[in-house]
Image (tube, coloured by chain):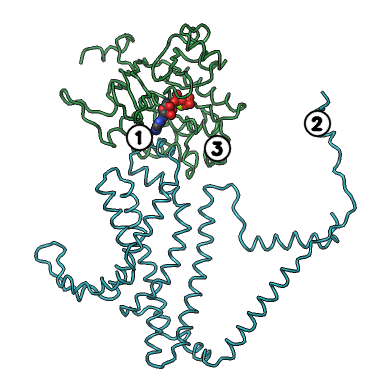
Chain colours: A green, B cyan
Amino acid sequence: MSATASQPLLSQSATPMVRADGIEKNYGKLQVLNGIDLEVQAGEVVCLIGPSGSGKSTFLRCINHLEGIDGGRMWVDGKVMGYDIKGTRLHEQKDSEVCRNRTGIGMVFQHFNLFPHMSVLENLMEAPRLVLKQKRSIVRERALKLLDAVGLADKADAFPRQLSGGQQQRVAIARALCMEPKLMLFDEPTSALDPELVGEVLKVIKDLAQSGMTMVVVTHEMNFARDVADRVVFMADGVIVEQGPARDVITNPQHPRTKAFLASVL
Amino acid sequence: MSTQITVADEVPARTRDHYTIVKAKHPGRWASAVLILAVFAVLLQSVFTNPRFGWGTVGKYLRDVSIINGIGVTLMLTVVCMAIGVVIGVVLAVMRLSLNPVVRTAAFGYVNFFRGTPVLVQLLFWYNLAALYPLISFGIPGVALNANQLITPIFAAILGLGLNQGAYMSEIVRAGILSVDNGQLEAAGALGINRLHTLRRIILPQAMRVIIPPTGNETIGMLKTTALVSVISVPELLYSSQIIYARTFQTIPLLIVASLWYIVVTSVLSVGQYYLERRYAKGGQRNLPLTPLQRITLFFNTHDRLARKGGKL
Ligand SMILES: Nc1ncnc2c1ncn2[C@@H]1O[C@H](COP(=O)(O)OP(=O)(O)OP(=O)(O)O)[C@@H](O)[C@H]1O
Ligand SMILES: [Mg+2]
C-alpha cells in the first residue's frame, strides 16, 4: 500500500471507485465479455451504451459480483470483488462476505424488482435494518426523507402494485439509496416505462448525478447520456470500442461501429 | 384524408331501439335436471325406507362420548402431522435447491423413499420398530430406551403420517419457491441481503400464494388419511366406531356415523381453505374473485332486473 490512499485531494492518484481489469465472462461457449478495462473515478457519471447483446448488463452485474467473472479482476473502492487476497492467493469469498461488499453498491434494474409483499416504506427499510442492522427510527427517518426526495412522500404506505411504473422505479432508486451506497449502478432504468413516465425517472437520476454520486448507467437514452454523463463508453461484442467525453462521443463519434449504432438510435 | 378527429362532446348519444329480447330455450337442460332429480328421489327413498341403514342407531351414536373423543384424536393427528409435514417440507425444499449436490441428493432420496412406499406400510413399519431396534439409544452412550414403550401407537402414527407428509409438502413448497420471479433474488442480492434472509423475508412470503391452495387440499387429505391408523389401533374416529360395532354388530350405522363426521369436518375445512386462499391472492390481483354469496347475489340482481323491465333494453 502506498501513501496514495491518504491523499484524496489528488484525484488522479486516488483509488478509482471502479477498476475493471481485463474482465472476461462466458456463458458456456459464448464469450460475452472479452477483456473490459475501465476505470470510474469517485464522483464520475459513466454511461454505457451499445447494441443489444453487447454485454452491457453482464458487465454491470460483474461490478457488484451478481455475476462471477471468468478472467480479469474487478476492484470497487479499492477492494477486489468476490475474492480475499491472502499473500499471493485469491480466496473465493463466501456468500456472506460477497453480500457485505455489495452493501456499498446500489443497483437499479430495468424491471424495478420491488418486493411486492412489502409496502413502499418496508421496501426501503428492509436491507438497512437486516444487513446494516441500523435502528428502526434512524432508517425510517432516512427512508421518508428519500421518498420525499424522489417525490413520493405520500406513497410510503402504498404497495408496489398500486404504483405506476415510473413511481415504482423511483421507489427502487430510493430503496438502493437507503443503503447509503458509494456507487450506483443503473441497468436501463427507463426501458420498461411508458414514454410519458421516462422523464420523471430521468430527473431523479439527474439530480442524483448532480449531488456527486458515482454512477454507471446502462441506457438507450442518448439525450440523457449527453446531458448527464461525464463520459460515454460504447460497447460492442464484449469489448469497449470507443469512449470519451459524453458530448464528443455522441455528437462526433469516431469509430465506424459507434457511428452506425448512433445513426440507428438517434 | 377522410378520417375525422372527434372529441367526446361530438359523439352521438347511444342509439336505442325497441326490440324485445327473447331468451333462448334450453330443453336439454330441463331434461337433464328432471332426470337427475328423479334418480336422486329414488335414492333418497331407499335410504330412508331401508331399515338396515339403522338411522335410529346412527342418531344414538352420533354424539357418543367415544365417537367425540375419536374426532378429537383425528383432529389432533391432522394438525400435528400437517405441522410436521410443513416443517419437513420447507427444509427438504430448501435442501433440494441447495448448491451442494450431496444435500440435494439426500433430499431427493427422502422424497423418493416416502413417496415410493404406501403410507400404510410405513405406519406398520413404525409400529413394529421394536422388532428392528429393541433398544433405542440415539447414539448417546448410556441411553437405552425400550422401543416397545417409546413407540406407542399414537407416536407411530404421528411419525408415519408426519414424515410421509413432509415428502409431499416439499414438492409443494419447492413449486412455490420456484414460482417467485428471479428478479427478486437479484434485487435482494444487490442490496446485500444474504441467502438465508432472502429466503425467509423475500422468497417464502411470496411463495405462500402458490403454497397455500394445495396445502389446504393436503390438510383435507390428511384428515381422511388418519383413518389408516386404525390398523395400529389408535382410537381415532374410525377405530372408535369399529370398537363399538365390534361389540354391537351394528356395522353399517356406525360407519355412517363416522362418514357423517368426516363430511362435516372436511366441509368446515373447505370453507376455511376458500377464505385463506382469497386472503393470499391479495398479493397478486388488484381485484379479488367474488365469494359464492356475492356471486349468487349478483346473479339474482342482474337477472331480476332484466325480468322486471320486461326484457327490454
Ligand atoms: N444467464 C445467461 N446465460 C446465457 N447467456 C446469457 C446469459 N445472460 C446473458 N447472456 C447472453 O450474453 C449476451 C450479452 O447479454 P447482456 O444482457 O449483457 O446484453 P446487453 O448489452 O445488456 O443487451 P440489452 O441491451 O438487450 O440489454 C447476450 O448474447 C445474451 O444472450
Ligand atoms: Mg441489458
Q: Is residue B181 above or below residue A210?
A: below
Q: CA distance from mark 3 to mark 1?
A: 25 Å
Question: In what element is the residue under mark 2?
Answer: loop
Which is in the foreground here, disc 2 or disc 3? 2
- The residue located at (86%, 61%) in the rendering is B310
Mark 2 and mark 3 on one chain: no
Contact between labelled residues 1 and 3, with CB atoms less than 8 Å apart: no
- Residue A122 in view here: yes
Residue A155 badge = 3
Q: Residue at x 34, y 28 (%)?
A: A29
Q: Position of residue A192 (x, y in %)?
A: 54, 30
Where does the N terminus of chain B fall, quadrant-wise?
top right
The residue sitting at 51% across, 64% down in the picture is: B272
Residue B262 appears left or right of A74: right
Image position, residue A106 (x, y; %) = 40, 28
Q: Residue furthest right?
A: B18
The one nearer the camera, A35 or B180, is: A35
Quadrant location, the C terminus of chain B: bottom right
Q: Chain of mark 3?
A: A
Residue B166 placement: quadrant: bottom left
What residue is disc 1 on?
A: B192
The residue lying toward the viewer, choosing from B200 and A89, is A89
Q: Tell which tag, 3 or 1, sits nearer the viewer.
A: 1
* Left or right of B295 on screen, residue B87: left
Badge 2: residue crowd in 10 Å (few <14, some 14–19, many ≥20): few
Residue nearer the viewer, B263 or B280:
B263
Residue B203 position within the rendered picture, expressed as x and y whole percent measured from the top left? 41, 45
Crowding near the residue tagged with mark 1, few <14, some 14–19, many ≥20 C-alpha atoms within 10 Å = many
Disc 2: which chain? Answer: B
Residue A238: give x, y in percent of width and height: 39, 20
Name the element at disc 3.
helix
What residue sits right under mark 2 in the picture? B7
